[in-house]
Amino acid sequence: MMIERRYYGEFGGAYIPEILVSTFEQLAAAFREAKNDPHFWTEYVNLLSTYSCRPTPVTWAENLTRHWGGPRIYIKREDLNHTGAHKLNNVMGQGLLVKRMGKSRVIAETGAGQHGVATATMAAKFGFSCTIYMGEVDVARQRPNVFWMERLGARVIPVRDGTRILKDAINEAFRDWATRMDDTHYVLGTACGAHPFPEMVSYFQSIIGQEARRQIVDRAGRLPTRVYACVGGGSNALGIFSGFWDDPVELVGVEAGGRGLATGRHASRLASQDGTPGVAQGYKTYFLQDSEGQMKETHSVAAGLDYVGVSPILAALRQEGRVRFEAATDQEVLEAFSLTLAKEGLIPALESSHAFAQAFKEASDLGKDDIILINQSGRGDKDIFTIADAFSDPEWNKFIQRKAEENHA
């Protein structure tokens, strides 16, 4: 029997080698069975509510609201999840599926390291052996997360092929999976890849949107005007957006603008003109690729957004016009990070800071009766060395000092 292909418009599918077909069929069947089991979602929510910090709160950013003088700003606090990001939602759900399938080993890719830490944590909790593939560049810039993965008992393998970032880690993880399908499950970290991963990861991350919708109505008295989320692969964005699909709420996904879209040194697939439809790593979506289909190098100050592809679900939503996509540059992101830290005492991950940057750029477009909801998908502890390097630059320090003086004027 041929594996089921799940498409979102023209995007998605399961373009996989024959050797992996039976494994994907097994996974798709296990996922369908779990979704149809009325006790599975309850087990999943109970696990997160006792092991992590669910429901994570929505925080009113009173000082940022006053600073911008326009819309009320609220923040969904996925940074308060155990391991520091939304990633745990997905891996704990997949961990329950691994138990159902009777497998004993998990592998994963990671860029920023948050998914790697979450997977290593899940493996420790459930008693699985664990191997994490991480691009050599990301190993260097995310050293704290590498330390914790190893302390949790995972084997971290630096990937030295290609551009030595996230896409290369994904390739290595698939090579591993093809050699140990009987006992191994690949815990893909975002809503990309071949079916059923986009649907499955979105399903587990939908807990963010379900909570956020209830919380914002309870706290603010009504639905938000706009919801902002950063977009790498797309899991945190789809998670929070899912709570508002049927509502008159504008959804804004923010990609990595890097050094600027005109420079080509970015990771924007949907907000730029550089992304084109193609097939790679098992699925069809928008990729940053040349005319011959070879993947281009990407750049972002945030390792978790430094990826050539994007969720096929988001690609379809862009075509439908349901989600608007923008890009924030590295400088805009560092400015937004610094302002959020100074005004609210919050430390957003550099990935999440993209959502803050775009929300701040657009705050003046809205009035005092409007409401903004920003998904803080993770916390910035992991970025300490990247941020320290940026702040050690004399010109950047002068800029920050000038901004601080303006903010306190």
Image (tube, helix red, strand yellow):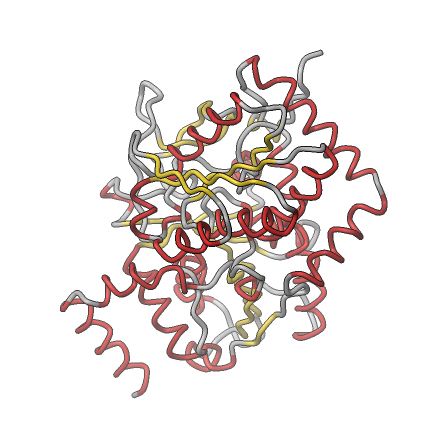
Residue shown at 34% from the left, 54% from the top: 143
Residue at the bottom extreme, as displayed? 409
**Looking at the figure, which quarter contains the C terminus?**
bottom left
Residue 381 appears in view:
yes
Q: Nearer the viewer, residue 80 or 374?
A: 80
Instruction: Decide: is 367 above or below 42.
Output: below
- Residue 5 appears left or right of 251: right
Image height of 367 relative to 154, above or below: below
What's the residue at 39%, 59% (across, down)?
350
Q: In the image shown, does 263 or 46 lie closer to the viewer?
A: 46
Query: Residue at point 61% right, 42% down?
Result: 128
Question: Is residue 247 found left or right of 358 in the rendered image?
Answer: right
Residue 383 pos. (x, y %): 36, 60
Q: Position of residue 313 (x, y in %)?
A: 58, 37
The reply, left or right, for residue 392 in relation to residue 125 is: left
Say which quarter of the image contains residue 373. bottom right
Q: Is residue 248 visible?
A: no
Image location (x, y in percent) of residue 264: 26, 40
- Give the residue displayed 46% in from the left and 81% down from the top: 63
Image quadrant containing the N terminus? top right
Rendered location of residue 161, percent (x, y) = 30, 30
